[in-house]
Structure formats: C-alpha cells, structure tokens
Image (tube, rainbow, N blue to C red):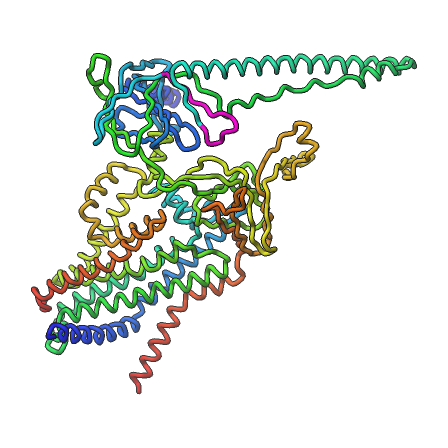
Amino acid sequence: MRRLVSTLLLCSALTPCLRADVPIRVEELIYSLTSFTGSGYSSSFALQTTGRIYLQAGVDNFISLRRTLVYWWPITAEWKTDTDSLNQPFRGTLELRSSSGTRRIPLERYTYFSPAGEPEGWKVATGPDADAEVARSAALNDANSAALAEYQRKSNEYDARVESLGARIAELKRMGRAAAAAVSALGSLTRPAAPPEHSVYRSPPEPVQEGFILNLPAGEYGARFVVPDGTTLEGSDKKVVVYIPRRTGGVGFEVIPGDKWTRPEESKTPSSVLYVNGSTDLYLRPFLENEVNDLAYEKTLSNQSTGNPSVNRWVRVRPVTGARIELAGPDGVQQVAEQAFAVEQAKGTGLGYTIVPLDPQAARNGQAANLSAFHIVVPHQRSIIRIRARDATGTTVPGSQREIRVVVRSALRPALAGLAALPMVLLLIARGVRARRTRA
Amino acid sequence: MIGRTLLSRRMHAAVVIARRQVTETLLSPGPYVALAAGMLIAFFLSTGFVNAIDSSGFDPRLSPVWSFAGRALAGGFGPTFVERLLSEGPFLAALVISCAPVLLYLCVASVFRFGQEKSAGAVELLVYGPADGTSYLLATFFKDAALSACTVVFLALYFLALSTMENLALGPMFYTALPVVCLLSVALCAYGVLCSVAAENGASAFALFTGIVAVFTVLQIGSSIVEGPGVRAAAETVSAVVQWFSPLYYASLCARSFDGGNILEFLAGLALLPVLACAALAAAHLLIRRKGVRS
C-alpha cells in the first residue's frame, strides 16, 4: 500500500512535465522569396532577424513582404511559417539602394511557368498577361479533364460491352447454339483511344501572386519597404546580395548504375573521376551546369541553409540535348547514342529488375520509357574508360571529358603497406653507413 | 663588390652548416618515424577509398576511415567542400594529411634546436669563425626547405605507387598541390627561423612558432566553416589583416584559383609564398643583427 501511494505521488509530481510540445508561434515580418536557382524556382522566406537575401543576377526573382507567425520546428531544425493563422501582406514599394543610386520597385501581379519544348525556358507573365496565362492553363486543364472523363466513360462502355458479349458467347456455347454473330460483334469492337496529353507546359503557371520582381545586375543592394504614405516599414531593412555564376557552360553527368537505377549519382566537377567497381553497367545523362558560390546557392534554395563561402559548386541547369557520347576504352573508340530503356521487374515474389531497351512496338502502343540515357558497358576487370560528349555537329562539348576507372582491390596491398616501413630501413642504412665511417 | 663578397661568404658558410645539419637530421629517427607515419596514413586513406567504391561510385559510408573523415569534414566545411576535395580521388586529401606531421616535425625540431643551441652558446661559438648569425639562420632554413622538398617528393612517389596499384588517378589538383605544399613548407620554415631568432630560448621559440601556426590555421579554418556565421564573420574580420602574413592564406588562394581555372591568380599565389618566406628571413636577419646570437 505504501509503495502504491509513493508511486502515485511520483506520477502526480511528474504530470506537469508530461504535456504536448507545441511550438511557440511568434509574430514576425518576413520576406517571402521565390528565387530562380538556375533550373527552376525555389520558395523560401527570410526571417526578420536575417540580414541578407541572396538572388541570382539577370533573372526574375520574386519577393514580397508579409506579417505572419513563425515557429521553430525541431524535427527538421528549421523555422516554419503558420500562414493559416496570420498572413498579412503589405502594399507599398521596395526601395533598393546601391552605389549606382536608388530605385523603387512597385508591386506587380505575376506568374511563372515553363513552356514545353523549351528546356531552358522559364517565362514570367505580369499583370493581365499573368491572369490570361493562368486562365489558359486552367482551360487546358479543364479540356484535358473533360477528354479524360470522356475517355473513361467510353472505356467503361467498351469494357461493359466486351463483358456482356463474352457472357453471351459463353451462354450460347453452353446451350449449343451458334455464336458467330456475337463473336463477330466482339471482334468488331475497338478500344477507345486515350486522349493525347497536352504538352503546352513543362511546368504550368503558378497561381497569380503579388510581389516585387527583382531582375538585378550583380552587386549588393540595401532594401527596405516603403508604405504608401512614404514612411519606411520598421524591420524591413535587408541587404540583397545578387551574384553571378563564376563559370557557365560546364557539363555534368547523372550516373545511373544498373543495379540501383532509382539512386542516381552525379559527376559534376569537370576534372572529377568516376570510380566504379565494375559490377554493373552505367547509364549516363549529361546536363549543362553553372558554377556558383556554395553559400550563395544554398541561401538561394533556402534562406535558412548554410554553405561554404570559400567553395564553389556546380549546379544543374538543363539537360544536354542532341548529343552523343564518345567512349574510348579497352575495346577502342565507340559512339554511344541516347536510347530509351524499360525497367522490367523480376517475375515471382523475389525482388529485382532488369533494364532492357524499350521495345519499339511497345513504345508505339503507348508504353513510356522508364529511362532515357547513354548506356555504357563497364568491363569487370580494372580498366580506364574515357568519355566525352559530342554535339550534333560532332564537336566535343567543352568540359564533358570524364574518366571512368574500374577499381579492383590490389593483391599487392601488403607490399604497399610494407613500403611504409621504407623510411625505417633508410634510417638503419644511414646509421650503418655512419657507424662504418666512424670506425674507419 | 664588398657586399657581393660578404653575400657569397655567407652563402658558402650557410651551405656548409646546412650540409652538416642535414646529416645530423638524417641520423636522427624523428623524421623517419614521421615519414613512416605519413605513409601509413596515406595507405589507409587510399585503401579505405578503394574499399568505399561500389557500382555507382565512391560512397564514404562503406569505409570506416572515410565515413568518419567525410562526416567530420562535411560538418565543418560542408558537403560541397568534401565533394570537391575527393572529386579526383583520395590523394589530394592524403597529401595534405600525410605531409602535415612530417613538415611540422621538421619545422618544430629546427625551431627548438635553434633556440637550444642559442641558449647553450653554440651559435655564439660558431660566429667567432667565418660564419655569422645570418649564415646560421640561413643554414637552418636551407636544411628545412631541402628536407621538406625531399619529403614531399618521397610521399608523392609513394602516392604514385598506390595509385598505380589500385588504378586510382592522382589528378591535376594533386599535381598542382605538390609545388604549393613545397612552397608552403618553405614559408613555414622561414617563420620557424624568425621565431627562433625572436625568442630567447628553445621552449619559447617552440611556443611562439606553434602559436603563430595555430593562429593562422584557426583563422583559415574559421573563415571557411559552414556553421556558425558569427565565428566565420569574426575570423574573416581578423583575417582581413592577418591573412597577408599567413602562408596558409596564399596556399588556399592557390587552391581556390586553380579550382576556378584562374591560372594567373594561382601563379601569383604560388609566387607570393617564397616572397613571404624571403620577408620572414629578412626580418630574422635584421633581428639577429640587432639582438646578436647570445641568448
């Protein structure tokens, strides 16, 4: 009884500690950022306490100012916004100060999208054009949905008709009657064609928003928000760092190993060597890349990220199209063309798959390729393969040279480790020579 | 004419003393042990790298050595730094890591020895002959520079053997780093000489040299770390002045400019390392003339 009482007392003493850990929300003035990263747009926000905003030069970036609730989310170790509870955008102008003067940027309605067939193209529409573009996208979506619904309806009708005719034929056969007419009717049925997917957008327009469009030359700018009465909004001062890539036009490779096709690696640095153990073939996809400052790029992706200001990194911009890969290996020089592949799952209950070239007949029947890449056959023994991309005219794409080295553990490792004792042998020799000279 | 005679006499004395000092150093076990340690480190880094290669490339998680080193470096300097460091193979990192103990040993041993000999009056005894204090400090510098260069060459040959056996590439960054490491060690040797002259005895010379190298290292690391923007800002502020005296700054300038394809800046950084060494030696010369060789 005494033990029970003491346990209850202990539990009651601990009860105040056992409460839900709800993050504390704090009201703050934040800058919402939609920044161009080279290949697309990234959304983040800058806290009131943040001093700097990083943007790429010469491209459209969008920022807006709003009052909202922010809270620290320990699971991902980052600040988050609670815009459902408070989301108060401000109207006014953004004042940018630099050594070349001061400029005021007005609020604009905007949207951004990437049209299909233009791999490098992101377009921005403002004002009425933005509304029109979003409306056009919505209309296309509606038309697409309607066509899909119609296809679904026809498809269901087709399935039902096939089912009923099948049942009718079976019944006629069971009764011993001729089913030729029903069989003929079944044979004359055609499966409805799926509606073609609209390919107007690679990335459809975002809903129209209001913000400041910043397309600035490289440099540092002082930014502050000016409300319509001409006063500056307190807490809106920020430094905007606009940067340019250190180098452009590099070529990187997405490296897809045959045994882990869902986990591709990247070879981005032009002087880098791709080391593999030769257990599987590789599938390569070249892409154009720019080299930017690591800190600036990380801050562009998310203003809360950290990066190394002393290091530059290559970032993917867009795929290299119309190229082929020249491969110089143990079997001589070969030209490899881009090919479509299908990933076929292993039959049975076991896991596994094989990557096979996409059957042209299956492609005509609408089967999409799982992978479109350059297939590099990797030898299993130690070897060096040199690759380079050539464009449609046969010219080597600058920065596309790479080495693939198949590394096999050397049998001479003990000897290599033993070489580390060489200095001690040299010491013995030196001392021996000295001793002989001293004796002489 | 008199100046040239004095210079040639001084150089001759310096070369003769340096030769004797090299012989003494080569008979002591210290440099050999440090070199063997450096080679073992290189061996483990290189074989660990090979062990961590799978079908898709280098995966540091597959090797305990690189798993730890990769996480530590990525935590301090960011994943991009690690990616660039290992993009051509393990040898750039291995060169820096394995050279460090040998080169530091050579510098520290010289600094300590110079101070001790000065305290014991050995240098004073020497300058009664044809040599003077400057000849002696030049001799120490020559000895350190020659042994450092030999060390780097020796290690480079070992790396070549490792790379050939394991089918790894040494890479253009590795070859470029060789002269940088040589000249960096020359500049550090010059600082060692300056510390020896400036301090009163071996222990204080050792402390002074270690302190200066530590300050340069901390500032260099501090201005490149990923986490702690406050620390980075503080290091950058202090570095704005101190970096011009730091051999590590010029070495990192070389690395950065080569990485960015700026060959002129790379050559400038490379040329400034011996200039810095000469400046430190000139300062040591002036100091020893003023203070004399008596402790």
Locate the C terminus of chain B and report the quarter of the image it occupies: bottom left
Res B89 seen here: yes
Looking at the image, which is closer to me, B167 or A21? Answer: B167
Which image quadrant is residue A174 in?
A: top right
What residue appears at the point 50 percent right and 61 percent down from the top-left corner?
Answer: B165
| Position in image of residue B146 (x %, y %) | 28, 68
Q: Is residue B87 magenta?
A: no
**As displayed, is residue A20 above or below residue B11?**
above
Q: Is residue B268 left or right of residue A171?
A: left
| Position in image of residue B144 (x %, y %) | 26, 66
Q: What stretch is highlighted in magenta?
A: A109-121
What residue appears at the point 83 percent right and 12 percent down from the top-left corner?
Answer: A168
Res A73 seen here: no
Which image quadrant is residue A225 in?
A: top left
* Image label count: 0
**As displayed, is residue B84 above or below residue A362?**
below
The residue lying furthest to the right in this view is: A176
| Position in image of residue A323 (x %, y %) | 54, 41
Looking at the image, which is closer to me, B47 or B170? Answer: B170
Q: Is residue A199 left or right of residue B100?
A: right
What residue appears at the point 26 percent right and 44 percent down from the top-left corner?
Answer: B222
The residue lying furthest to the bottom in this view is: A440
